[in-house]
Image (cartoon, coloured by chain):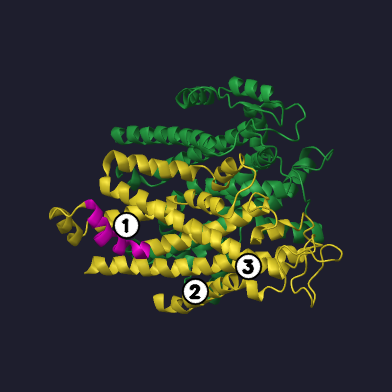
Chain colours: A yellow, B green
Amino acid sequence: MTDARRPKARLALAYLALLTLAALGADWIAPYDFREQLTGMGAQAPSAAHWLGTDASMRDVWSRMLYGTRNTLGIALLAVAVALTLGTAIGATAALLGGIVDRLLSRLADAFLAIPRILLLLLVVASVESVGTYALALLLGSTGWMGTSRLVRSETLALLATDHLRSARALGVPASRLLRRHLLPALVPTLATAGTIAFASVIPLEAGLAFLGIGLPIPEPSWGNIIGEAGGLWLTRWWLVLFPTLAITTTVIAANTLRESFQTRLQHGIHAEGER
Amino acid sequence: MRGNQLRRIGDAALLVALVVATCFILIRLAPGDPFYPRLDDPAWTPERAATQRVAFGYDKPIRIQFVYYVSRTFRGDLGWSHSRNQPVAEALASALPATGLLVVTALGIAFAVGILVGAWQGWRRDSPLVRASDRVSLVLLSVPEFLIAVFALMGPALAWRWFPTAGMRTPYGPEGVLGLLDRLHHLALPALALGLPIAAVVARLQASAMREVRDAEFVRAARSRGLLDGLVLRRHALRNALIPVLTYAGLQLSTALSGAVIVERLFSWPGMGRLIVDAVGARDYPLVAGGVLVAALCTVVGTMLADLALRWATPRLRARA
């Protein structure tokens, strides 16, 4: 099973690396500035001069896609970092302290899960004029920790039941050291899985918000707001829909492929330990 | 047994309380001010803003505001929507049935298709068709709903004109049986756009549950008794493989409501999602907050119902936990 999946996971990783390169090298690769409004008439279909066409303001879509990759990936990675940090802190606290704290934190995660995430974001965004890159990433991250906290909580509980952690506890190892030296290293595979799950959910969410015009402020491109530039003329401006959709979909497929590979490996690890 | 049930009710009450508190905290933590100067509103003056601030209790300490908020919420008073010029509760109540229809249909499609396809995939493990459908579900799972909606609009609705592009029914259209068909015609695309990505998730869960059950001893035993393949599948394997899928059902309501926000807007579906997005555009703060609260409470109730159904379907779980 794992062997059959490995080449797929490698391919996914290579693709994500390629995207990162494109994002980092946008300054050199992009033929135009993402803000530059060229002279000419409105949105034009792909041509030799503009590989992916231009949008309604006569901006080069290929350049905007490249800079959009930088914005989208940057926001997603930052959001994942925030979600993982919050989720690990909350999940580990719930598992370590147990009792009423565990119950309260678990219900808190349920409460956050019960509120449809896009509405949670709309609620916050409704009150501000526009959101900056960092604020957006922070918002996306702070509404996406629940999956991580659940995974971390159950994995920590499983780890605490193992012999070496029980003996560590019995020896009176302080909680902070327990967390740093024993729990966190063992949680790395879980966090890798949680990270890919968070990544795969943040990309469409950011795209959806940008599409609604609630994401980054106007001249900044992201995959979602390029689609929004089509302004409802889906058929006549198909290139504004097709290329960002391909970018979003392939990225999420890559993330999901990685997640499945991590998950099988994770289950493998647990089974191997159980059999020993 | 009774203690368990009390505990569950307590948990549900705690959950509702946390949802209400979370909504309140998010409203108050959010930067900005619901009474800030409005350029598009010629009637806005600092004095009027100040009176409104007092009228909505924003001048009181935060603790008092929270008590007010909770007591008003539980009496069903969600405030006044200035963009719709009607009580928030009324605006939401008028939009709720449309969203309910869309979301319930979408989830119905998602679970029917997902369970059938997933069960088939898990049962016949490795055939080219299974692998192909597995790839299709991975792609569907990875396309955001709103993009499926955009493509549904591009192809079937705009290019081929098979389906209408907007609304719940043809204005001044037929009544009776034809009217019902007209409504189904309008419902099909948004419900599919919303349901298919969820169907992909359900199919993957169902397939992996089925693969596990397939090798279980009770299934092998049923087989070795000479039962027909189809009978083993329906009676023994599928029933047990449904458990993880049903466990997941409640949460899908939240996903569907999230997706409905954009899908409704794209298809001009007169539901809660569109109402809330419009409210964000109009800076109609109480309406956004009320909508979020109602959506969250719907999810909580849905999750509890799914949980009850699961408990009813699997006696094993009733005794445990």
Which residue: 80% across, 60% down? A56
Residue at image location 76% in from the left, 44% down from the top: B167
Q: Residue A225 versus residue A196: which sits nearer the camera?
A: A225
Badge 2 element: helix
Left or right, residue B43 beside residue A105: right
- Give the magenta range: A175-190
Q: Is residue B40 above or below residue A20?
A: above
Query: In the rendered image, which quarter contains the N terminus of chain B?
Result: top left
Q: Position of residue B262 (x, y in %)?
A: 66, 49
Residue A61 placement, left or right of B89: right
Q: Which residue is mark 1?
A: A155
| Tag 1 and tag 2 share a subunit | yes
Residue type for callout 2: Leu
- x then y, percent, for residue B248: 46, 51
Residue assigned mark 3: A247
How far is disc 1 from disc 3 in space, using C-alphas? 33 Å
